[in-house]
Image (cartoon, rainbow, N blue to C red):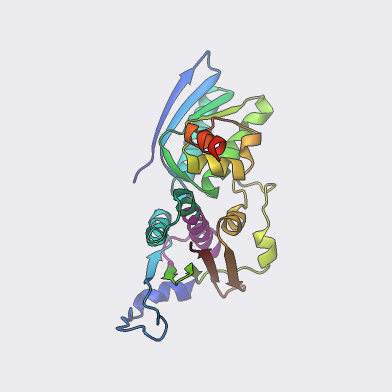
Amino acid sequence: MKAEIKIKQYLNKSWLWVRLSAELDMAVADTFRDTLSNAMASSGCRNLWLDFSRVSFIDSSGLGVLLGRYRQLQPLGGKILITNPNEQVYRLLVASGLHRIMEIEQPQSYRLRREGS
Amino acid sequence: MEAARELDKQSWRCIRRDAEHNPDGKNKMQLRFLSRSENVSLARLLAAGMAAENELTVAELDEIKVAVSEAVSNAIIHGYEGAPDCYVEMALALTDTQLVIEIRDQGVGIADIEEAMRPNFSGKSDRMGLGFAFMHSFMDEVEVQSAPGQGTIVTLYKNLP
């Protein structure tokens, strides 16, 4: 399964929108990191918007790439927004503590289940 | 690592009957695969597939996938230092009460297992050192056998409902 990465630039060069279609594990981590780093450097964008609607799985290799991008943006005062994560991905973003340093959209199914229990 | 490469030349023994080791007749599976990164997803899918024979929730199956993903990634990245031509072995066994997953490499091994298990966010690399933390929090028990030059065996236990 090949990873597909789509990138757009928004809002006066401020936001870089990126949609990854893959399982974000060690097989994809290097490509994703290099693509993101290059796009951030060449666009000069400070803020990263990651559309995770097509990320079906993440483990610590994928979380490491996210932390690395945070470290890259933090000195510039930039931020990371993650939208549409599935429940598995959301749970790991919370378990790793990345939800404290990034803006992460909570999946609706997760919220409903929490309220219901 | 040479030893691991040699595995290829050994005959792949086919055991006709395993009554001694598997008296209760529950399912068992063994797999040997190259230390290539694309095999990480195949390994976790197989483990989740066997786990799915039981009444586990989707969230629990996801957690088993993460634990297997971490153990296999560790074998490739740390055990074999990224070499793609070595062998990782995975054995899966279902008992009445547990799913047992053993992941084995013949790589460099771990000198200080406790140290290796501690999360490490400060490293220069992007890796968070969360692999063992995830294995511990998502499985009911984790065993690690390793020594420098002796390879590593990680055994993951999940209690079944």
| Position of residue B118 measured from the top left corner of the image (x, y, whole percent) | 68, 57
Residue B82 among magenta residues: yes
Quadrant in which residue B52 is drawn: bottom left
Residue at coordinates 66% horizontally, 30% vertically from top-left? A74
Report x, y in % for residue B25.
36, 77
Q: Is residue B149 left or right of residue B58?
A: right
Residue in the foreground of this view, choosing between A48 and B48? B48
A98 w.r.t. A7: above or below: below
Q: Is residue B40 magenta?
A: no
In this rendered view, identify the residue nearer to me: B51 or B36: B51
- Considering the whole magenta stretch, tell me its main secondary structure: helix
Relative height, residue B158 to residue B28 (above, below): above
Q: Which residues are magenta?
A: B64-88
Task: Find residue B64 and report its horizontal and vertical position in percent.
Answer: 48, 56
Quadrant hosting residue B111: bottom right
Q: Position of residue B9 (x, y in %)?
A: 35, 78
Q: Residue at x 49, y 38 (%)?
A: A34
Work out whether B160 lies above or below A19.
below
The front one of B116 and B43 is B43
Residue at horizontal 47%, vertical 51%?
Answer: B62
